[in-house]
Structures are given as structure tokens and as C-alpha cells.
Amino acid sequence: MEISDKLRHYRKQKNLTQKELADKLHLSRKTISGWENGRGYPDIKSIAQLSDIFGVSTDDLLKDNNLLEHYDEQNKQSLRARKIVKVTYYLNFIFILAFYGYIFGLLNDDNSITLLILFGNMILFFANYSDWNRFKQKKQLLGMIIAFILLIFLNAGIIPTNNEFFQLIKGSDQAEDLGVFTGEVIIIILLSICVTLAICFYPRSIKRERDSNNTEN
């Protein structure tokens, strides 16, 4: 019997409507309907809750090849996402150092390429990042906001935006100067986000790997 049929069978056996079951799981009735019609699968946490509600074993609910394949695919996607997050996190450091090198005149290549790569790398990181629950803690969220604000002021002091602003007021070609000023504001914001990423978004999977290695040693 497939998981969809089992859920429908056990729910009716307990004389529960889809809405009542959804309320017990703190989910929507539409989610329960999707499970029972094979349009989706409950996650492991929901399986454990359903096991308690129906009074059956989790093994009984999990005896479905389609469900196991679904979990296997989810696990592969999760591992792939964690690898991408790990790689892009470290690349973020390299690109930040390179860009600051351009700002301080240590590197002389075209920094627009590095800026584009930095932006693309940041997008790839956030597209695969999943540990957003850490910022439900007020301390973590407040720390991230404070770090970002401080970095905005720091980068505004490093990048000569103020000089461009005064040139904009005095200059004859205000449209060109406005473009330069706007570009530098964007650079300040982007660089501040990337440094905040490096400080506040350290992947916990990396920490767990290091703790595991230290325990083995």
C-alpha cells in the first residue's frame, strides 16, 4: 500500500477529517490533501507525528518505495546544496580580499569582473543556504543587522563616495558623476552584504565536520 493510501486509511480509521488532521500537525488542509492524492510526501518529522496520531509504527508508514526514493532524492539534493554553500562561502572570502586589494591599489586588474563574480557567488550561496532558523534567535538577528550597518559605514569610509558626492555638486557633467556615485553606493552595499555573509553565515555543516574530526583525533 502506498503512503497516500495509508494516510487516507488511517485518518478515516481515527474518524478524522483532513482539516482536523491538519490542525494536529499545524499544517494546511491542502497539504494533507496533497499527501493523500500523491502530490507530495510528508517529511520525517511529520511521519513521526503521524505515527503517534494514528498509533502505528513509523516503519509501517515508511514501507513505500516511492516515499523512500523521494527521501533519497531529497537527501542527495541536501548534500549537493551543502557542498555548494561550503564552496561559495570560502570563495566569498577570496573575492572579498581581491576586491579590497583593488580598492587599496594592491591589484591593478579590472575590478568590475571581480564585482560580477562576487555578486554571482553571493546569489549562488543564498540560493542554496537553508539554515535560516538560526536567525529566529533575536541575538543572532540583531548581531547580523549591527554587523551590516557597521560595515556600511566602514566601506563608505574606505571607498571615496564622499569625494564623488562633492564632485557631483560642483561638476559640470552631473549625469556622469551621478552614475559614478550610484555605482560606488552599490559597491558599498554589495561588499557589506558579502562581508556580513562571511561573518554571520558560517555554515554549521563545516563546524560539525570539524567537531567530528576533532573527536575522532
Image (cartoon, grey):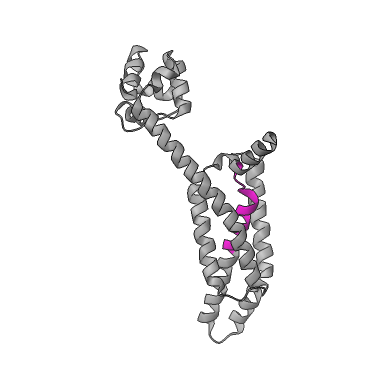
104, 88: nearer the viewer = 88
Q: Name the residue: 48% across, 27% down.
A: 45
196, 1: nearer the viewer = 1
Q: Name the residue: 69% across, 63% down.
A: 154
- Compared across the picture, whether 181 is left or right of 139 comes to left
Q: Quadrant of the N terminus?
A: top left
Q: Position of residue 134 (x, y in %)?
A: 60, 40
- State yes or no: residue 195 in magenta: yes
Q: Is residue 188 above or below residue 91?
A: below
- Compared across the picture, whether 56 is left or right of 179 comes to left
41, 186: nearer the viewer = 41
- State yes or no: residue 202 in magenta: yes
Would residue 29 be visible to someone looking at this image?
no
Quadrant hosting residue 204: top right
Give the magenta-colored segment's residue range: 189-204
Quadrant hosting residue 183: bottom right
- Compared across the picture, whether 208 is left or right of 182 comes to right
Would residue 208 be visible to someone looking at this image?
yes
Question: Which residue extends farthest bottom?
Answer: 172
Q: Main secondary structure of the magenta part?
A: helix
Q: Quadrant of the C terminus?
A: top right
Q: Position of residue 147 (x, y in %)?
A: 67, 53
Q: How many marks?
A: 0
Q: Position of residue 171 (x, y in %)?
A: 58, 85
Q: Position of residue 211 (x, y in %)?
A: 67, 38
Q: Is residue 153 above or below residue 8?
A: below
Question: Which residue extends farthest front?
Answer: 217
